[in-house]
Structure formats: structure tokens, C-alpha cells
């Protein structure tokens, strides 16, 4: 079974803090993704990566950055958290580009 | 880029009825169409997918149909059960290059006993 693990289920941070969301997958997948899930807006792609040290912007990259130093780990960084970044964040990985994605359990981030 | 529209946003049915969720996509090059189910508090999980060289695919009580000419695809659930209650997402992508899945906004299905 593919396992995608996110470091936290729930996180509360203050406005202006730097926030790190960590994601690890154990299936040697090349591709990793960060999505944001908000009611009525579905799953929106923030950033993705097709290889170590490689990153591409998704549909809503503003206010976020990512890091992929190792194949199995993909980190999402909020440089200066704002209240409009309160959301559910989902990490995913896939073996092939555009193919079936396996999701982590999600991190519900609240910025106060 | 690709745009995926999904309808309805909410769907309430009685146990045993059928449920249909419809999606349209904009990029005629897309050739892979998965459906994900997300139960309350859980991660989205793939339940069925279809490639563009196939018009229909079934797996027990669920089926997906694809009309490439009209650029729409649908999820059909027969004999619904309360455990089918969840949010369902459709998606579309091109299986090549650096493609990514584009998701619809989701449909909340509620199956009442």
C-alpha cells in the first residue's frame, strides 16, 4: 500500500509566522503535489515537483514556496502566514505524470 | 489550461436509488479521467478511472461513462447505500509530459436510509 504521510493533522499558527508542512511518501514516486482544499472550491494545486530539487507552480502559488531535497519528502512553506491561508492542505504523490494520485491525510491549518 | 466543471454540488438520494454526477472538461487533449471519493475527515481515494480509448467502465455498483466528442464524463452509482455518502471529485489530465490532474469542485452525496 502506498503511504503518504503528512507531519501534522492540525496546526494553529499566528499571522506572520513561517510555517512548514511536511510530507513523506514511501513508494519511490517521482511526482509530488501540494493541494489546498476549501469548501465549494474543490482541490486547487499550489505547487508540484517531478524530481528532486525541481518545482513547478500550480494554480495558486502566491504566498507559498516548496522544497524537495529528497525524493520521498516534499515540504510546503508559508513564508509569512496570513488568515486567508487558513485551509486544509493535502499532499499527494503519483508514479506517472497526470496519473492516479495518492493523498496524505491532510493538515488543517488555522492562522490566527 | 484544463478546466473541469462538476454538477451537482450536492445530491441527496434515498437508499437504493441511483446517483449520477456529471463533469465536463475543456481540453480535448485530456485522456485520463479519475474519480475520487472523500469520506468525512478522510483523504480522497481513487474509486474508478477511465482512459479516453474506452467509453464505459464498471466496477460492481459504480460505473463511469465518457463522451469524448461532447467532452463530458459521468459517475453512476447504483443501489446506493449510506456508506456511499461522501464528497466525490472528478478530474482530468493528459497522460504525458509534466501533466497534472485538474479537479472539479466536488459533489456532496448524501444517502438517506
Image (spheres, coloured by chain):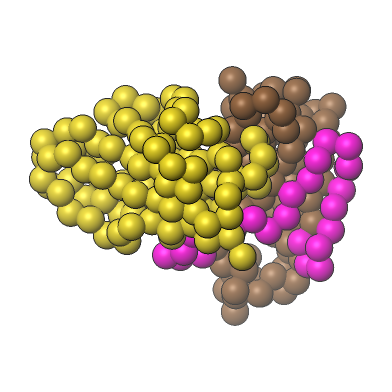
Chain colours: A yellow, B brown
Nearer to us in this view, A28 or A45: A28
Nearer to us in this view, B29 or B107: B29
> How many marks can you see?
0
Residue A76: % across, % down:
34, 40
Q: Which residue is painted at 60% across and 75% down in the image?
A: B82
Residue B98: % across, % down:
62, 27
Q: Is residue B8 visible?
A: no
Q: Is residue A13 visible?
A: yes
Residue A4: % across, % down:
49, 57
Q: Which residue is painted at 23% across and 56% down in the image?
A: A11
Residue furthest to the front = A70
Determine which quarter of the picture holds residue B59. bottom right
Q: Is residue A110 above or below residue B66?
A: below
The question of residue B45 being in magenta is answered with yes
Q: Which residue is painted at 54% across and 46% down in the image?
A: A93
Position of residue B75 in the picture relative to residue A8 (left or right): right
The question of residue A106 being in magenta is answered with no
Determine which quarter of the picture holds residue A105. bottom left
Q: Is residue B57 above or below residue B91?
A: below
Nearer to us in this view, B42 or B97: B97
Residue A7: % across, % down:
33, 57
Q: Which residue is painted at 80% across and 28% down in the image?
A: B70
Point out the stretch of residues depicted in magenta.
Answer: B39-62
Amino acid at each position: 500500500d502506498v503511504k503518504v504521510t503528512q507531519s501534522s493533522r492540525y496546526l494553529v499558527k499566528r499571522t506572520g509566522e513561517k510555517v512548514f508542512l511536511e510530507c513523506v511518501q514511501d513508494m519511490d514516486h517521482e511526482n509530488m503535489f501540494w493541494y489546498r482544499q476549501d469548501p465549494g472550491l474543490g482541490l486547487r494545486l499550489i505547487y508540484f515537483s517531478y524530481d528532486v530539487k525541481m518545482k513547478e507552480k500550480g494554480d495558486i502559488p502566491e504566498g507559498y514556496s516548496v522544497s524537495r531535497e529528497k525524493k520521498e519528502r516534499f515540504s510546503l512553506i508559508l513564508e509569512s502566514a496570513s488568515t486567508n491561508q487558513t485551509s486544509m492542505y493535502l499532499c499527494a504523490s503519483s508514479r506517472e505524470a497526470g496519473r492516479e494520485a495518492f493523498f496524505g491525510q491532510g493538515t488543517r491549518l488555522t492562522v490566527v | 489550461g484544463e478546466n473541469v466543471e462538476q454538477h451537482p454540488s450536492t445530491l441527496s438520494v434515498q437508499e437504493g436509488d441511483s446517483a449520477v454526477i456529471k463533469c465536463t472538461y475543456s481540453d480535448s487533449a485530456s485522456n485520463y479521467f479519475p474519480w475520487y471519493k472523500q469520506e468525512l475527515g478522510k483523504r480522497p481515494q481513487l474509486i474508478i478511472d477511465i482512459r479516453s480509448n474506452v467509453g464505459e467502465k464498471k466496477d460492481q455498483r459504480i460505473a463511469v461513462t465518457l463522451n469524448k466528442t461532447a467532452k463530458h464524463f459521468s459517475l453512476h452509482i447504483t443501489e446506493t447505500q449510506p456508506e456511499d455518502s461522501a464528497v466525490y471529485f472528478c478530474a482530468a489530465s493528459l497522460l504525458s509530459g509534466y501533466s497534472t490532474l485538474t479537479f472539479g469542485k466536488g459533489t456532496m452525496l448524501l444517502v438517506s436510509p
